[in-house]
Image: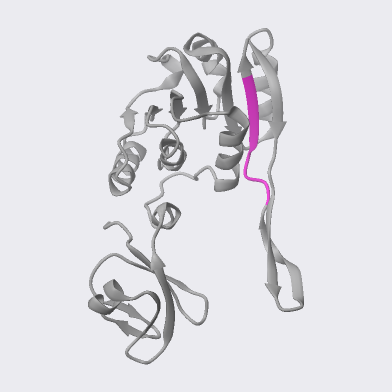
Amino acid sequence: MKSIKKVLIDEKGNRHYWSSGDLQTDLGILKEEDIKNAFGKIKSHLKKEFIIFDANFVDKLEKLKRGPAIITKKDIGYIITSTGIHRNSKILDAGTGSGFLAAYLARITPNIITYEKNPEFLDIAKKNFKDLDLDIEIKEKDIYQGIDEKNLDLIVLDLPEPWKVLDHAKKALRNGQFLVCYLPTISQVIKLVENSKDKFLLEKVAELMEREWYVEGLKVRPKSQMIAHTAFLVFLRNI
């Protein structure tokens, strides 16, 4: 898929993503030349008005192909802010999936390595990285079998059995740095925490909820839909 260049929002609030060529919508056609030159607002051939602006990184991510379920933005943001990573940090992400976490991390530091053992997911991630113009090292590798890298500042695992990685992670992480595990169920959390004793310091277990609000004049209320439980985040510190 071609990289998204523009985002258009119609009068109904629907978003349309444009890469090239004319854009056909149920509110009319917008010509390529008009889209290229538009700033702020644009009208279709049916005189329907659209808001238009340049696509940013987040907009481009929204239209990428997805394989397995992705780690959500609320969880990614919490991982970034809780681990203190910076532009010189060296990070390993295992269980690449569609590559969304690795893509966000690569915006902070170029030193990203990601492991994925499923060939189908590997191909999806490679294509997504290319579409985002990101140079991320991706390995077809099962992290349960070991970690090649040393002196890492962060390891993030999106895997069903992260306790199998504890010994490998301890050797690969620098002292005081984080192993973060993304786990859907509390039973996984319990097993991980129990197995991590004497190897890691349990910094915290967190679950994040995200609720948007509807605001229009004096009409103010929480939206009925919210992003509730996605997973538990377990933060372990190498000691």
Magenta stretch holds residue 233 = yes
Answer above or below: position of 163 versus 42. above
Which quadrant holds the N terminus? bottom left
Say left or right for 208 vs 133. right
Position in image of residue 182 (x %, y %): 58, 33
Image quarter (top left, top right, bottom left or bottom right) of the C terminus: top right
24 sits to left or right of 62: left
Residue ranking furthest to the bottom: 46
Q: Is residue 160 above or below residue 166?
A: below
Left or right: residue 167 compared with residue 94: right
Number of labels in the image equals 0
Residue 173, percent from left and from top: 51, 14
Out of 18 and 199, give the one closest to the viewer: 18
- In terms of image quadrants, where is residue 197? top right
**Residue in the picture at 56% in, 15% down:** 166
Q: Is residue 4 magenta?
A: no
**Left or right of 4: which side holds 197?**
right
> What's the coloring here?
one colour
In the depicted view, which residue is nearer to us: 186 or 38? 38
In the displayed structure, 4 sits above or below 203; it is below
Q: Nearer the viewer, residue 129 or 105?
A: 105
Q: Position of residue 124 (x, y in %)?
A: 33, 43
Residue at image location 69% in from the left, 70% down from the top? 214
State the extent of the magenta-drawn residues as a range: 228-236
Residue 23: quarter of image:
bottom left
Q: What residue appears at the point 43 percent right and 25 percent down from the top-left corner?
A: 88
Q: Position of residue 122 (x, y in %)?
A: 33, 36
